[in-house]
């Protein structure tokens, strides 16, 4: 079904809902690369005007990617909660934006609504929202998840400690972990991207994390970010797997390019849960996503990259994750060209994820061929901290020496805590005080309590 | 009054000896000390300049010609750096004039060699010519029929597929500037592809990464690449079916290379390819 808008004597036509959504998107190099972007600023606004009048329930009977062709569409439609959707069922997309910004949409109301919202609805309304709307509404959405601590509480910000090393050297990885813990990082997860894909080496890294966490009784979880099939195999071998990791995307075909489907994710979650390694809960899936991945895999079906990213969160949501991380600027300038596009995408992803009920964090990052720098990351960090992001990355000095990109640093999390008064998760905060790493107010202690952790280095006496 | 930055306690400072990561930086309140702000800023500036510095294709071509090689320069279909960064498809395709020039030289070649700017012209300026110089004796030993060496501007890895096909070469080796990291603005990558043709993906290639004096040095990199070329031509394949076992060749073949000891030292410093399981785009392909 087509859409037509007349503005100031010019008529704009959109052949179908996919085209309307794509052309309503803020400018983005990936949509231009795919040939989906609007041809002018006026065409963007015309698309938004038409989108604002669209009844929300249209998305329940007009699939952007056919139900028969795509298991992600089937997941979205088959698990839609009509009762949860009822309070907004009569609204248009434009009225939905007004309602989300209003006092009627409290944290409790939004939590009950989440299962009634489809990713396409979230993406559509986000296209009508300014950055401040994305922050305001996301801040009201609370998504709490638990494995060995309690992530996502109001006024709290967690950090994934990311201690990567170019050759997976154990002492080098431990050096980054000890440094990060001594800055109070690591409550979201201590998560290593391995350079090697050998199961034996990954098993060694898992044992390294497990022994460290047990030895110092750190209330957190470890993860080596490897393919879900590897995690399942490692669990079979008796390796200590806390979290099961996987990159996911918003179409069946893009997921196939990652070597996964929904049943494999289910198998991964069940294998993880069979270990019963959690203490405060059993949210143990860790997903990473990012706009542009479907286009990169030639699997976008003519749908804009932001809408596809929101669909990836529907995939995540089905497996009750602990952590969902949009790796927003990693993919490169052909998908998100510059700091402005990366910042906008980070806010959209966080908003859509939270509205859908996903425990959303963000790898606030960029590559050196993008038109972005550390100032842009400071801006996005400040905005996402304000929006209540569940977690960010902690990379030594913001420079990942294995993946060759820049993210947020141990210092960056100190900055955002100081300016916004954000605390660490409660269990981890108490541990840091016991270790004398922080004082009673959560500030780093002058007494260098982190030095006790040096005993973990190879060749040190216990 | 400004507070003097606390450098981490002496014990934590030793962490910096264990990893190239930026650990034990100290802090000024919550913030990074000025010296590290400047050090990081300079590293980022080097990486940015590596992406945007004009590629001196003429100079590289002259130095390669001085090794006794016939050199042909080509352009991709990306007319500018901005077009190159926004449109990876254009960087994978030859300009019409360049395609004609290569097709005119169609012949019976075992291997086509390409040196291309990719995402770091700095890497090519520094490392391409010494690597080729180290390779030539090893290739001569194999008795290969080499196509004219191509220097490519605004090129992605897959531009090599079109070039190899235009020559009719059995295999193509692309030496190209990799996406620069803060600590490695000048990494050269080598991609080997058997039976080059349009539409291939990275699953069809073998890659040697981080070629530079501080990473994988020229001699061991040349040995690895030469080994892969010989195996690719012998077994008629590249990609996931061809594993790099050149280190075994060194252990079992005493005549292999005088630099074998050097290789075992360099391998430990080699930056492996990015893990396929982490979330990645194809930004540097």
Image (spheres, coloured by chain):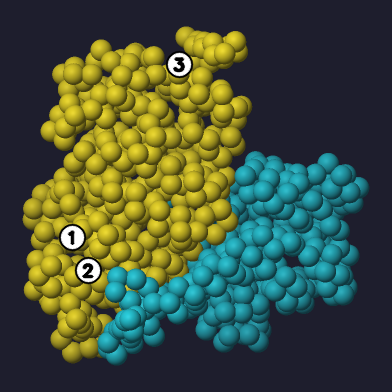
Q: Residue at x 55, y 46 (%)?
A: A337
Image quarter of residue A141: top left
Q: Which residue is mark 1?
A: A424
Query: Marks 2 and 1, how far apart in space?
Result: 8 Å
Residue A130 screen position, x and y as percent = 39, 35
Marks 3 and 1, the one that precedes in the sequence: 3
Q: Which residue is mark 3?
A: A50
Same chain for the residues under marks 3 and 2 in the image = yes
Residue A389 screen position, x and y as percent = 27, 48
The foreground one among A363 and B130 is A363
Residue B214 screen position, x and y as percent = 57, 79
Label 2 CA crowd tier, 10 Å (few <14, some 14–19, many 20+): many
Residue A313 visible? The answer is no
The foreground one among B105 and A340 is A340
Which chain is displayed in cyan in the rendered image? B
Query: Marks 3 and 1, how far apart in space?
Result: 43 Å
Q: Which residue is mark 2?
A: A184
Image mark 1: chain? A
Give the secondary structure at mark 1: loop
Image mark 2: chain? A
The foreground one among B49 and A96 is A96
Residue A438 screen position, x and y as percent = 16, 73
Marks 2 and 1, the one that precedes in the sequence: 2
Q: Colour of chain A?
A: yellow
Same chain for the residues under marks 3 and 1 in the image = yes
Image mark 3: chain? A
Instruction: Please report contact status of discs 3 and 1: CB closer than 8 Å, yes or no.
Output: no
Q: Residue at x 58, y 56 (%)?
A: A369
């Amino acid at each position: 079904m087509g859409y037509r808008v007349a503005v100031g004597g010019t008529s704009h036509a959109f052949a179908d809902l996919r085209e309307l959504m794509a052309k309503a998107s803020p400018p983005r190099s990936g949509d231009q690369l795919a040939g989906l972007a609007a041809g002018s600023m006026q065409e963007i606004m015309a698309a938004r005007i038409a989108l604002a009048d669209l009844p929300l329930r249209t998305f329940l009977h007009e699939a952007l990617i056919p139900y028969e062709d795509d298991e992600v569409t089937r997941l979205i439609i088959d698990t839609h909660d009509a009762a949860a959707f009822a309070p907004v069922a009569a609204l248009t997309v434009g009225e939905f934006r007004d309602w989300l910004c209003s006092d009627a949409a409290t944290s409790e109301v939004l939590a009950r609504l989440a299962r009634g919202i489809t990713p396409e609805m979230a993406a559509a309304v986000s296209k009508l929202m300014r950055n401040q709307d994305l922050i305001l509404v996301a801040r009201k959405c609370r998504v709490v998840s638990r494995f060995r601590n309690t992530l996502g509480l109001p006024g709290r910000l967690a950090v994934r400690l990311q201690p990567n090393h170019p050759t997976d050297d154990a002492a080098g990885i431990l050096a980054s972990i000890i440094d990060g813990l001594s800055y109070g990082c690591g409550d979201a997860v201590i998560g290593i991207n391995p350079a090697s894909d050998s199961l034996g080496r990954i098993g060694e890294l898992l044992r390294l994390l497990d022994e460290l966490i047990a030895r110092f009784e750190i209330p957190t979880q470890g993860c080596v970010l490897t393919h879900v099939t590897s995690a399942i195999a490692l669990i079979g071998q008796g390796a200590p797997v806390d979290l099961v990791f996987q990159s996911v995307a918003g179409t069946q075909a893009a997921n196939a390019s990652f070597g996964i489907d929904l049943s494999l994710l289910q198998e991964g979650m069940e294998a993880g849960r069979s270990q019963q390694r959690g203490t405060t809960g059993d949210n143990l899936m860790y997903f990473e996503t990012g706009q542009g991945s479907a286009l990169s895999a030639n699997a976008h079906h003519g749908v804009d990259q932001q809408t596809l990213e929101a669909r990836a969160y529907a995939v995540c949501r089905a497996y009750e994750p602990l952590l969902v991380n949009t790796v927003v600027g990693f993919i490169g300038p052909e998908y998100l060209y510059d700091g402005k596009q990366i910042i906008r995408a980070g806010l959209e992803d966080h908003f859509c994820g939270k509205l859908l009920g996903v425990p959303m964090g963000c790898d606030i990052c960029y590559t050196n061929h993008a038109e972005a720098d550390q100032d842009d990351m400071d801006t996005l960090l400040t905005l996402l901290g304000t929006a209540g992001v569940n977690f960010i990355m902690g990379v030594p000095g913001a420079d990942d020496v294995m993946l060759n990109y820049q993210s947020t640093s141990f210092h960056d999390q100190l900055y955002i805590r100081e300016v916004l008064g954000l605390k660490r998760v409660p269990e981890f905060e108490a541990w840091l005080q016991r270790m004398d790493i922080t004082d009673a107010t959560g500030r780093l202690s002058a007494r260098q309590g982190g030095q006790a952790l040096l005993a973990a280095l190879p060749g040190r006496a216990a | 009054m400004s507070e003097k930055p606390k450098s981490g306690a002496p014990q934590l400072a030793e962490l910096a000896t264990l990893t190239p990561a930026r650990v034990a930086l100290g802090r000024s309140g919550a913030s990074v000390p000025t010296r590290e702000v400047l050090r990081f800023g300079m590293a980022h500036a080097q990486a940015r300049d590596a992406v945007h510095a004009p590629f001196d294709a003429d100079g590289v071509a002259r130095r390669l010609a001085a090794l006794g090689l016939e050199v042909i320069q080509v352009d991709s279909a990306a007319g500018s750096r901005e077009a190159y960064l926004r449109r990876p498809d254009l960087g994978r395709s030859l300009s019409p004039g360049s395609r004609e020039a290569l097709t005119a030289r169609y012949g019976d070649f075992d291997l086509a060699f390409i040196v291309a700017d990719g995402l770091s012209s700095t890497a090519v300026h520094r490392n391409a010519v010494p690597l080729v110089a180290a390779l030539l004796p090893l290739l001569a030993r194999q008795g290969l029929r080499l196509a004219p060496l191509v220097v490519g501007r605004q090129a992605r890895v897959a531009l090599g597929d079109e070039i190899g096909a235009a020559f009719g070469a059995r295999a193509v080796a692309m030496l190209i500037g990799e996406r620069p990291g803060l600590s490695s603005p000048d990494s050269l990558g080598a991609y080997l592809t058997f039976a080059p043709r349009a539409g291939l993906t990275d699953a069809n290639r073998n890659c040697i990464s981080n070629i530079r004096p501080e990473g994988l040095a020229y001699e061991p990199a040349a040995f690895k690449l030469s080994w892969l070329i010989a195996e690719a031509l012998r077994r008629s394949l590249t990609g996931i079916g061809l594993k790099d076992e050149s280190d075994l060749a060194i252990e079992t073949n005493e005549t292999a290379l005088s630099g074998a000891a050097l290789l075992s030292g360099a391998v430990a410093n080699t930056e492996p390819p990015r893990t396929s399981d982490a979330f990645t785009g194809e930004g540097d392909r």
